[in-house]
Amino acid sequence: MAITYSEKVPDLQTYYDLRESVEWNNFCPEQTQKALDNSVYFVLAKDGDKPVAMGRVVGDGMYYTIVDVVVRPEYQGRKIGATLINKLVELIQNDAPKGARLSIQLLAAKGKEEFYVKQGFKICPHEFCGPALRKIIYT
């Protein structure tokens, strides 16, 4: 296994296939393409020509959210997810101006919280913030 990593945003079908590999629902094509086009950073992992993992970042220069962290089940447990997270955080840090303060957050899939704790994230609430909240709207 020779996993390679690139900052290339995948095509829509590859993105959908990776999400489906972990049984996540997909969004409509127009919405998804817009989201992919507006990603601040993207890391795609491949085993040869086969896409096996991805992660992306959305943000505004101060606040960043890591989303769509997916590793195909048959590739989990091989440090691919940790490498993705580290690469995404490194991209954010490398782009920040000297003296910047960055806030990086994510929503973990249920049962995956400890993976992110191992990558240096803290479970909310903690001393600096309250609980994470979200609202989902269907149109």
Image (spheres, grey):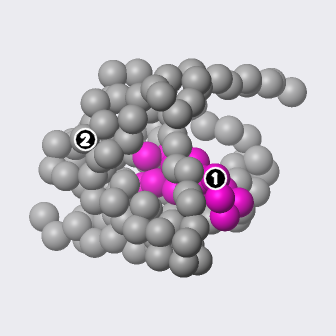
Q: Quadrant of residue 138?
A: top right
Crowdedness near tag 1: few (<14), some (14–19) or many (≥20) residues, C-alpha within 10 Å: few
Residue 87, x across and y down, in percent? 37, 65
| Chief SS of the magenta region | strand
Q: In the image, is residue 106 above or below residue 99? A: above
Compared across the picture, whether 132 is left or right of 139 comes to left
Question: 58 or 75: nearer the eye?
Answer: 58
Instruction: Give the residue pinned by disc 2.
Output: 118
**In terms of secondary structure, where does tag 1 sit?**
strand
Q: In the image, is residue 37 above or below residue 30? A: below
**In terms of secondary structure, where does tag 2 sit?**
helix
Residue 93 included in the magenta stretch of the image: no
- Residue range corresponding to the magenta coloring: 54-69
Q: CA distance from mark 1 to mark 2?
A: 21 Å
Residue type pointed to by label 1: Tyr
Q: Residue at x 16, y 43 (%)?
A: 77
Q: Residue at x 69, y 49 (%)?
A: 32
The residue most toward the right is: 139
Instruction: Give the residue pinned by disc 1.
Output: 63
